Image (spheres, rainbow, N blue to C red):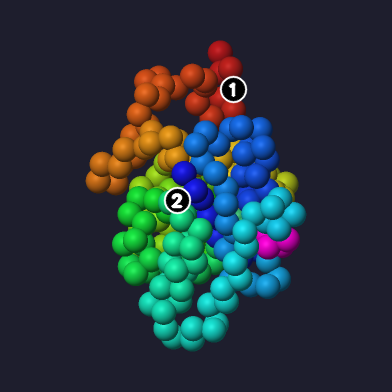
């Protein structure tokens, strides 16, 4: 399954995917193309260094013409025979022209436990809001913002000493683990979407470890 990774920034999630691919952890997923909307995106260099095709398609070149922008994206994906799309820190919203060409074939990583904290400014809002557990989500992309069916989530504690930056760093490590896992399942045909629920075919029927509760429960006897 040929995969394009869309990035707008430094590309650490792209790197996590590349390392997973090198370690044969992506199953039938073959990373082929990096698409960025910014020439400053570190992901562009990472993609080149690892021998992927790269495409710089600035959104600004299309002004208010989102449909034209999305048709250009689709043309580039068609040239490379792309079958799956991963949004990894891609800051543009994709609309119906693009998404209808890739139904249930576009996934996104978001640095929060959705449906809490969609959109931007996640880490300051979590720290200021006093939540005890934060985390990351990989989900299918639909026409809402950070709203599509959830594939996998990972949680981390929010410490009293956390700043938005330190929390973001802890969450990023979770992103780097759950995104390659989600892509493996997607490329392997293991994800069944029923309404808003994503079922993992041939997955475990029971949780294998303890639930994550933070702060930990104390022995109260
Ligand atoms: C990640 O936190 C991702 O969840 C968010 O933007 C960040 C991208 O980081 N949407 P990177 O470019 O993969 O390093």
Q: Position of residue 201 (x, y in %)?
A: 35, 29
92 vs 164, left or right, is left
- In three-dimensional space, the C-alpha distance between marks 2 and 1, rounded to whole angstroms, equals 45 Å
Q: Please, is residue 158 above or below residue 54 in the view?
A: above
Residue 40 location (% of width, % of height): 71, 71
Please, which residue is most extreme toward the bottom here? 63
Can residue 64 be seen?
yes
Dominant secondary-structure state across the stretch colored magenta: helix
Query: How many numbered marks have been drawn onto this rendered protein structure?
Result: 2
Query: Residue at the spot x=43%, y=35% of the render?
Result: 188
Q: Relative to residue 9, is residue 29 depicted above or below?
A: above
User: 198 or 85, which lies in front?
Assistant: 85
Residue range highlighted in magenta: 42-46
Whether pointer 2 and pointer 1 mark residues with C-beta atoms closer than 8 Å, the reply is: no
The residue depicted at 62 percent of the width and 62 percent of the height is: 54
Q: Is residue 44 magenta?
A: yes
- The residue beneath circle 1 is 218
Instruction: Identify the mark at residue 200; answer none if there is no mark.
Output: none
| Disc on the earlier residue, 2 or 1 | 2
For the point 53% across and 77% down, the residue is 59
Q: Position of residue 200 (x, y in %)?
A: 37, 32
- The residue at which mark 2 appears reads as 84
Q: Quadrant of residue 134?
A: top right
Kind of element beneath mark 1: loop
- Quarter of the image with the C terminus is top right
Q: Quadrant of ligand 1?
A: bottom right
**Around disc 2, counting alpha carbons within 10 Å, would you say few (fewer than 14), some (14 to 19), or many (20 or more)?**
many
């Amino acid at each position: 399954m040929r995969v394009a990774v869309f990035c707008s920034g430094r590309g650490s999630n792209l790197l996590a995917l590349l390392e997973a691919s090198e370690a044969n952890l992506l199953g039938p997923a073959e990373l082929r193309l990096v698409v960025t909307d910014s020439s400053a995106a570190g992901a562009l260099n990472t993609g080149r260094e690892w021998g992927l095709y790269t495409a710089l398609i600035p959104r600004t070149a299309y002004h208010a013409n989102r449909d034209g922008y999305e048709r250009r994206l689709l043309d580039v994906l068609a040239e490379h025979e792309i079958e799956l799309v991963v949004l990894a820190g891609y800051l543009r919203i994709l609309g119906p022209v693009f998404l209808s060409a890739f139904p249930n074939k576009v996934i996104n990583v978001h640095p929060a436990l959705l449906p809490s904290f969609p959109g931007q400014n996640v880490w300051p809002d979590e720290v200021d809001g006093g939540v005890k557990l934060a985390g990351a989500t990989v989900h299918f992309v639909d026409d809402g913002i950070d709203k599509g069916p959830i594939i996998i989530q990972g949680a981390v504690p929010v410490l009293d000493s956390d700043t938005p930056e330190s929390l973001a760093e802890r969450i990023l490590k979770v992103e780097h683990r759950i995104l390659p896992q989600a892509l493996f399942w997607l490329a392997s045909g293991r994800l069944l979407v029923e309404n808003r629920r994503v079922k993992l075919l041939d997955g475990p029927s029971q949780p294998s470890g303890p639930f994550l509760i933070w702060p930990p429960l104390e022995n109260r006897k």
